[in-house]
Image: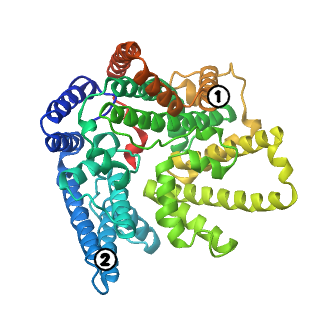
Amino acid sequence: MLFTSALFAFLYLPVVFAGFFALGRRSESGAAAWLFLASTVFYGYWMPEFTLLLFSSVGWNFWVGTRISNVLQANIAGGRIIARRWLIAGITVNLLLLAYFKYANFLVDNLNVLFGQRWSFDKVILPIGISFFTFTQIAFLADTFQKGVRDYAFINYGLFVTYFPHLIAGPVLHHAQMMPQFGKSKTYRIDLANVAGGLTIFCIGLFKKIILADGISPYADAVFNAAETGVMPNFTEAWIGALAYTFQLYFDFSGYSDMAIGLSWMFNIRIPFNFNSPYRATNITDFWRRWHMTLSAFLRDYLYIPLGGNRKGSIRRYANLLITMLLGGLWHGANWTFVFWGGLHGFYLIVNHAFDALISMYGSRWMANPLFKFLGWALTFLAVIVAWVFFRATSFSTALRILEAIAMPGLALPLDAIHPLLWNQGLHPQTGLLLCAGLGAVAVLAPNSNHIGEHILILSHKYAFLRSMLIGAALTLGVLLVVINSARDAASAFIYFNF
């Protein structure tokens, strides 16, 4: 079920919202169970055949987590060793599950190429959201082993994992972030200030997705789909395609994240921000502090640091960075282009850290220079665009075709000439460039939606009259956007649903 659909906006959300707070006045555990059930329905509506898989994953990880905690709390001899074995068993099952559903076909296809065989394997359907609920539960097991967990109510745990605003495309949550909130009585009492702030930030995300991301997507699709068939774009088309996807992906995923945050505020739940204006980054390290922040933190805490982080010298640090980003790329999809995208960002990070070490010794005064910062931003943004080409392309030949055209101004045609890849789709290069420029200005110069949301939330708690105004305006805009989306020929799913 899509956040942008009429079914979600006009039926699912009102029913779940009303039921949650109606039950919350009588039974907090009943309200939690209701939201758990509603989240399962949300998941099952899209892929009902995988609801059992979701329940099995939740049950297994809850059981293993309690085993780990019980052993550690018992203070028996060798208890930590036993708990570690449970941790390894739990993570292994999670990774095997993820490997089967996400990488089985990829593995067989590559073995066929490697050994010249024709082994057949039934195509495995990827369960939606499996990467996110798997990583969420791996983090839970690791946190249980390292820090201990006190809340063992199965309903609350199940709600933590399946909580519908984050279930399909994140953010990646931690047990300690969510469980205390489910234990507070005020969570189950309606707060109009939170509703006003939540609806407002939800509408911002809705606008990002329906108007901005879906508005620019035809330009990206026209260029990448044509390049996939072997057609060489010209210089202008290639740049428009690459820039269009750069902004489509950002406004699509950040729009989802805003909607998830807004929905959570309506239910008096705070989930972490996932974006912090990443296209303002002045170096690639800064970019990864701003882009998909919860995944970046997960990879740092549960992969990069356990590998040794930066504790064993520069060479080992660079190797750990590269391994982390390669696996991060593979997490995004079973295709070598994703692995290469991750490796490319790993290479970027290595160069960035090496340059920082050099500049700190010989030219630290340059760091505050506005021109230096601008050049850093421009180079970072260019590097990100190049990497996104591999992320979007389904093959290396497609990506290289587009990058070759980007690097060859000689292939440029006048803007008023016919650009076949765009013209065949009824698109105009002037419009595409204007849209890219406008979206770039919004991404780089406009106020951050996180800050807007927090400010609105503060004002909503302070001024009662503002709540009514915001709720009315947000409902009107939300209905308009959903109607616009419903009038389109086909629903546009969020890009990260594929991961």
Front-most of 274 and 115?
274
Task: Tell me which label, 2 or 1, sits earlier in the chain.
Answer: 2
Q: Look at 53% across and 49% down and name the residue there.
A: 391
* Closer to viewer: mark 2 or mark 1: 2
Q: Look at 40% across and 36% down and name the residue there.
A: 261
Q: Position of residue 466 (x, y in %)?
A: 41, 15
Instruction: Name the kind of residue labelled 2 in the image.
Output: Ala
Q: Which mark is residue 445?
A: 1
Q: Look at 59% across and 21% down and name the residue there.
A: 428
Q: Look at 33% across and 71% down and name the residue there.
A: 92
Front-most of 326 and 3?
3
Tag 2, which secondary structure? helix
Hey, which quadrant is residue 483 in on the image?
top left
Q: Which mark is residue 83?
A: 2
Eyeballing the image, is 228 above or below 306?
above
Front-most of 116 and 184?
184
In space, the residues marked 2 and 1 are separated at their CA atoms by 49 Å
Q: Within 10 Å of the Cα at label 1, are there few (<14), some (14-19), or many (20+) other Cα atoms?
A: few
Tell me if 466 is positioned left or right of 426 in this view: left
Instruction: Name the kind of residue labelled 1 in the image.
Output: Leu
Q: Please indicate, yes or no, whether residue 303 appears anywhere in the rendered image.
A: yes
Q: Position of residue 105 (x, y in %)?
A: 35, 61
Tell me the quarter of the image containing the N terminus.
top left
Tag 1, which secondary structure? helix
Eyeballing the image, is 359 above or below 257?
below
Eyeballing the image, is 105 above or below 267?
below
Q: Position of residue 467 (x, y in %)?
A: 37, 17
